[in-house]
Amino acid sequence: MKQFIQNLPKAELHLHIEGTLEPDLLFKIAKRNNLKIPYNTVEELAKAYNFNCLQDFLDIYYQGANVLIYEQDFYDLTYSYLKKCAEQNVRHTEIMFDPQTHTKRGISFKTVITGISNACADAEVNLGVSSLLIMSYLRHLSEEDAFKTLQESLPFKDKITAVGLDSSEAGNPPSKFMKVFEASINEGYIPLAHAGEEGDADYVWEAIDLLGIKRIDHGNNCLQDENLIADIIDRDLALTICPLSNTALKVVDDLKNHPLKKMMDLGLKVTINSDDPAYFGGHVNDNYIAIQKALNLNKEEIYQIAKNSFQYSLIDDLKKEEYL
Ligand code: ADE
Ligand code: ZN
């Protein structure tokens, strides 16, 4: 089964580039930028990756991202993730990046987007991995701040396919970002959002009805509401499920109790993704292998999930045929 998963061509649809910062690369970049970090060794840092909830993780994740300063840092971060994709036969990836995490520290939008997009362009040629970029708004910040970010992105519009919504979900409902999503759609960005990771089914309803999202990041809590499940199936929205993230952040207590199989049996379209692989203990294949084992998924089910990853990607329909 491991070999079957390795050989399957796959796409990754839920990945935060800042969440791919492995402890060794974090140390390397901190050193060359002359930055002090509050850990002495790679092992000490890795030990701190023990979370009780989403916020526990976010505190460490934003702290880690502080070492990223120069275009080269964003390039190295992105290229090393794309190398991992090539090793795991991930042929296409849709990368989220959080501009506000960096612009808040005085790093320019241009530095961030140029480093990331140059790495994507090089990886497409050298590694045969294609990418699209999703600019994610941080939901713990104001809508006004998101509007500022939208403005900053406009000179680089040709490099960005979609907008997303991430960070602390509880207390920051999709409705808070209705206007900026409307403006983003008017600029040609495809709307996506995290919903139903820690937030209730109401947040998933809002993301669909008020933001008009075309895919649901996580969406686990849609299972609380039968009408919502029917609506998601009706609209043919896929869920980007992240098994190892869900156990690391205690969204699910044990992989054996993960709702992925139940979702498939209900007719929901699911994909398997790594979310923040440096923090949750595994890349795409590790997520496939862990959930396959926990839920005893068969080859047909695994194949269907991999097929969904291309089918529900943002690749142009005509180009999709080259992957399927
Ligand atoms: N930012 C990075 N990973 C995230 C997650 N799993 N949920 C919300 N925001 C995030
Ligand atoms: Zn995420």
Image (tube, grey):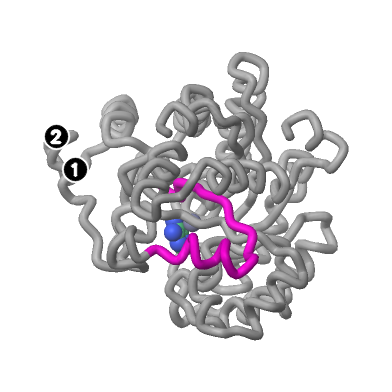
Q: Secondary structure at mark 2?
A: loop
**How far apart are the alpha carbons under marks 2 and 1?**
6 Å
User: Does residue 259 belong to the magenta stretch?
Assistant: yes
Residue type (three-letter) at the residue carrying disc 1: Leu
Question: Dots 2 and 1: beta carbons under 8 Å?
Answer: yes
Residues in magenta? 258-276
What is the x, y in percent for residue 274?
45, 46
- In the image, 167 versus 203, the foreground residue is 203
User: Which quadrant would the C terminus be assigned to in this image?
Assistant: top right
Pointer 2: what residue? 41
User: In the picture shown, does residue 217 fall above or below 22?
Assistant: below
User: In the picture shown, does residue 154 fall above or below 53?
Assistant: above
The residue sitting at 69% across, 42% down in the picture is: 310
Residue 169 visible somewhere in the drawing: yes
Q: Residue furthest top?
A: 126
User: Does residue 154 belong to the magenta stretch?
Assistant: no
Residue type (three-letter) at the residue carrying disc 2: Thr
- In the image, 321 versus 211, the foreground residue is 321
Asked if residue 31 lies left or right of residue 288, the reply is left
Q: Which mark is residue 45?
A: 1
